[in-house]
Image (tube, helix red, strand yellow):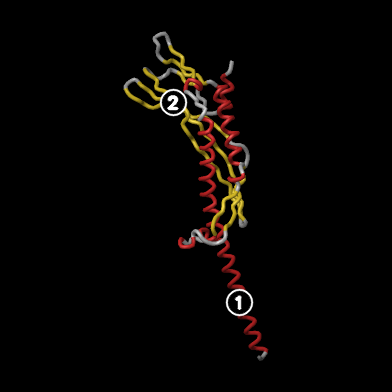
Amino acid sequence: MSAGKRRGCLRNLILCVLVITALIIQLEKNLSQTLLDMAFARAYSMAVETLNSAVHQVMETGVSYEELMDTQLDAQGRVSMLRANTMRMNALAAQTALLAEQKLNSDENQVVDIPLGAAMGVRSLSGYGPRISVQIVPVGAVNTGYDTEFETAGINQTRHKIFLTLRATVSLIIPTGSQVVEVQTTMPIAESIIVGEVPDSFVDVSNPDDMLDLLP
């Protein structure tokens, strides 16, 4: 083979290697984003389910509206004010947050396996191929808060609902990158029907830390 032909073959070989390398880099980039998107959906769903499970487990012991709110009546027997039981609400929030953190850190919730075929976006291969492990690492503590809602429940009747909100941050770690997921879930924990006029005053308990200011 002449020197010219050898140079031509070498040039073609280098060109093929460059093209293949570029295709691999582009495929890895697309696969990484697809994998992160799938991991995000799996992790978000898992984290929300874990937070909800923690709330349900704490609520199994039974929490009544009267435990959380003190209803004060005026001389005519009408509701004049609602006052939060800050000690009970703080204890309930702390217990739920601690249980949620323990569940998020449990062994079965630390890794999610995704088939490579599913990460490539091919439906027929969604359940096939080697498994890619996605590690889910909780970041920081679970934050809790309370929300309330008043809604009409009939003539001269108002339904007062109390919601417990849990917020958590988890980090997804895969071989090709990482991503942070903010998770929040809100669940009703108690409600009551107030008969008569809407209370003249209401103690806002949206932030558990602020409830400490209500203590004498």
Q: Amino acid at mark 1?
A: Leu
Check the image and report above or below for 95 versus 32. Answer: above
Labels 2 and 1: the sequence-earlier one: 1
Specify the quadrant that holds the C terminus: top right
The quarter holding residue 47 reads: top right
Along the viewing direction, whichever of 186 and 61 lies nearer the viewer: 61
Quarter of the image with the N terminus is bottom right
Label 1's element? Answer: helix
Q: In the image, what residue occupies the spot 49% across and 62% down? A: 125
Q: Position of residue 200 (x, y in %)?
A: 43, 17
Q: Nearer the viewer, residue 47 or 151?
A: 47
Tell me which amino acid carries mark 2.
Glu
SS state under label 2: strand
Disc 2 crowd, CA 10 A, few/some/many (<14, 14-19, 20+): some
Q: How many marks?
A: 2
Query: Dividing the picture into quarters, in which one does residue 156 lie?
Result: top left
Nearer the observer, disc 2 or disc 1?
2
- The residue tagged 2 is 191
Note whether 43 is above or below 192 in the view shown.
below
Q: Position of residue 91 (x, y in %)?
A: 58, 26
Query: Residue 23 in the image: x percent, y percent?
Result: 56, 68
- Residue denoted by label 1: 15
Residue 111, image x, y percentages: 59, 49
Image-based side of 67 in relation to 196, left or right: right
Most extreme residue toward the left, as rendered?
155
At label 1, counting other C-alpha atoms closer than 10 Å, the crowd grade (few under 14, some 14-19, many 20 or more) is: few
What residue lies at 59% left-to-right and 44% top-to-bottom?
170
Report how far apart the C-alphas of labels 2 and 1 lie in the structure. Answer: 71 Å
